[in-house]
Image (cartoon, grey):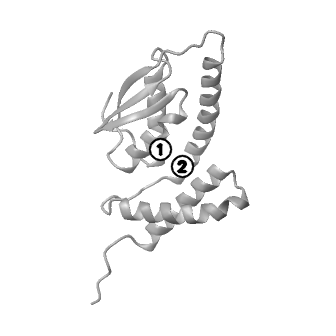
Amino acid sequence: MATRPAGPGWRAAGLWVAASTAVWWLISGGEPDSWLVGAPAVAVAAWAGLRLGSRDVRLHMSLPGLLRFLAFFLWESLRGGLDVAFRTLRARPRVRPGFQHHHTGLPEGAARIFFVNCVSLLPGTLAADLQGDWVTVHVIDTEAENARELARLERAVARVFGSAPMGGR
């Protein structure tokens, strides 16, 4: 009986290519001319994802959760940009920057990494560090409701991965 070679399969490769293509399309605004650079970038990103990704982790995503997240992402990106613009362009800017710590209940792996990478779409936030299940977030206003916003983002990410955040906060 022949054995299958170890390593990622065609399905995993296809997922990485599709995800990398979608990201490039979003970044480039769908410009056809961008694919001169985009095609090699997609190939390298897919190769790196396959090569660097853990072979033990299976990526289970919910299509309805992903579609809901896309709407969430677009809205939060717009809201975040406007919020930061209004805060900083005022005669007396409303900024009180600092760091806050957020305990995530997302499972270790893809969901947690996706969450950390999405933190910056919230108004005035940027993930600065991830240590275990604690995320250090740089915020533009330490008096804003950052914990509530991070919890909303975490629930949206959990829906993408078809799970609920584990444990309480």
Q: Check residue 159 in the rendering and tell me which mark sits there, or answer none.
A: 1
Residue 162 sits above or below residue 38 on the image = above
Asked whether residue 82 appears in the rendered view, the answer is yes
Question: What quarter of the picture does the N terminus occupy?
Answer: bottom left
Where residue 57 sits in the image (x, y, percent)? 33, 58
Which quadrant does the C terminus fall into? top left
Residue 113 x/y as whole percent? 40, 45
Q: Amino acid at mark 1?
A: Arg
Give amino acid for label 2: Leu
Q: Residue furthest front?
A: 37
Secondary structure under the numbered disc 1 in the rendered image: helix
For the point 62% across and 61% down, which residue is it? 37
Among numbered discs 2 and 1, the one appearing first in the sequence? 2
The image quarter containing residue 34 is: bottom right
Using the rendered view, name the quadrant where residue 90 is placed: top right
For this orientation, the residue located farthest to the top is 92
User: Residue 165: which quarter of the image?
Assistant: top left
Work out which residue is located at the far right of the displayed protein and give it.
Answer: 32
Classed neighbour count for the residue bearing mark 2: other residues with Cα under 10 Å, few (<14), some (14–19), many (≥20): some
Q: Residue 153, image x and y in percent?
A: 48, 35
Give the spatial CA distance, label 2 vs label 1: 7 Å
Q: Residue at x 65, y 19 (%)?
A: 86
105 left or right, relative to 21? left
Residue drawn at x 44%, y 41% as measured from the top left:
115
| Count of numbered badges drawn on the protein | 2
Q: Is residue 108 above or below residue 40?
A: above
Q: Which residue is mark 2?
A: 66
Q: Which numbered disc covers residue 85?
A: none
Report x, y in % for residue 32.
Answer: 72, 61
Instruction: Give the structural element (helix, strand or loop) at label 2.
Output: helix
Q: Is residue 158 visible?
A: no
